[in-house]
Image: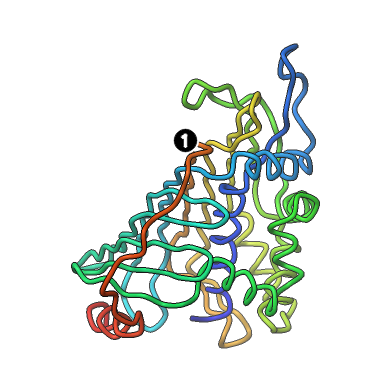
């Protein structure tokens, strides 16, 4: 996958973090008051969702072709997520087929059920965060701490906060905005390990101009209800470096959250085979 495709992957992770981490601000019984600042919109509700501890999460993502293939991907996930466990179902759709899997993750283990067989790897949520911290510790802090998320959200997106729609019977604040091209390019350059030319940065301006992000957050409980992020880059993008591949399709991700504060746990499946055995099957089906 090219470096520019990695930028879309970064945005997908950011969107899920923003949706799962939440954005918002607590208000008292006197009413919602004026909209929060953009920084508070992001940072205060990260604390709120941590207090809740978990949420039921539905994610739908669509993207351009996989590098080197003609496969257009669509990903759907629905399940329960907490800071220490995940239990849900993934579905990946591409021309000619759809693959589905049940996924269970705790702090140090991951289990995947594919075609009736359970697979296991000794690497869970805590291990993933440790590895991410070793590779991009500064970025991880920016995504997972209230102050860091508030700062990153303000730097990466520009837009307005106003009264949003009722979602599940709850009044919301809604952020409506788009990417800041300069910050977007800086993040790709810094964490992609490349140096962008002036032409590359001009093309990032074009990509950012097509972006749109909408976040709906409960006014009373500070909990996130929905996030939508879309990009529709021009098809004639030509970057100066080979690894900066242009996208050949729109990118979109929607995250919906509900049923906060439920216990997320599971019993480890028996007779699980090594997860490495599954990868060959998946690549064979999608190849």
Q: How many marks?
A: 1
Counting from the top left corner in percent of width and height, residue 63 is at 42, 63
Give the residue at x 45% y 46%: 57
Q: Is residue 75 above or below residue 5?
A: above
The answer to whether 149 is drawn above or below residue 94 in the figure is above
Dividing the picture into quadrants, the one containing residue 243 is bottom right
Which quarter of the figure has residue 30? top right
On the rendered image, what quadrant is the C terminus found in?
bottom left
What crowding class fits label 1: few (fewer than 14 Cα within 10 Å), some (14-19), or many (20 or more)?
Answer: few
Q: Residue furthest top?
A: 30
181 in relation to 247, above or below: above
Question: Where does the image place residue 204, in percent across and percent down from the top left?
Answer: 65, 67
The residue closer to the viewer here, 116 or 181, is 116
Q: Is residue 222 left or right of residue 74?
A: right
Left or right: 154 in relation to 269: right
Q: How is the image coloured?
A: rainbow
- Quarter of the figure with residue 90: bottom left
Q: Position of residue 60 (x, y in %)?
A: 40, 52
Question: Which one is nearer the viewer's eye here, 104 or 267?
Answer: 267
Residue at 53 percent of width and 65 percent of height: 107
Front residue of 234/102: it is 102
- Residue drawn 63% across and 54% down? 209
Residue 268 point in image, percent of width and height:
36, 64
Which element type, helix, strand or loop, lies under badge 1? Answer: loop
Check disc 1 and report the residue beneath it. Answer: 259
In the rendered view, would you say 220 is above or below 94? above
């Amino acid at each position: 996958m090219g470096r520019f495709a990695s930028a879309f992957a970064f945005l997908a992770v950011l969107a899920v973090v923003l949706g799962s981490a939440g954005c918002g601000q607590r208000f008292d019984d006197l009413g919602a008051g004026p909209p929060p600042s953009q920084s508070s919109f992001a940072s205060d509700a990260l604390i709120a969702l941590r207090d809740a501890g978990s949420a039921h999460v539905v994610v739908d993502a669509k993207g351009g072709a996989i590098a080197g293939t003609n496969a257009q991907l669509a990903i759907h996930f629905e399940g329960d997520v907490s800071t220490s466990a995940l239990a849900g179902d993934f579905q990946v759709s591409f021309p000619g087929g759809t693959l589905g899997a049940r996924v269970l993750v705790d702090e140090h283990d991951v289990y995947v059920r594919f075609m009736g067989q359970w697979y296991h790897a000794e690497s869970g949520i805590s291990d993933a965060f440790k590895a991410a911290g070793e590779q991009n510790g500064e970025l991880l802090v920016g995504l997972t701490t209230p102050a860091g998320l508030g700062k990153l959200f303000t730097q990466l997106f520009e837009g307005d906060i106003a009264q949003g729609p009722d979602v599940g019977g709850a009044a919301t604040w809604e952020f409506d905005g788009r990417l800041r091209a300069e910050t977007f390019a800086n993040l790709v350059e810094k964490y992609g390990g490349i140096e962008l030319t002036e032409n590359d940065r001009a093309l990032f301006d074009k990509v950012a101009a097509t972006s749109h992000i909408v976040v709906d957050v409960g006014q009373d409980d500070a909990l996130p209800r929905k996030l939508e992020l879309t990009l529709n880059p021009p098809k004639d993008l030509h970057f100066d470096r080979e690894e900066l591949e242009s996208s050949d399709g729109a990118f979109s991700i929607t995250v919906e959250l509900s049923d906060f504060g439920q216990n997320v746990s599971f019993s480890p499946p028996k007779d699980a085979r090594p997860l490495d055995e599954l990868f060959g099957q998946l690549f064979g089906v999608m190849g």
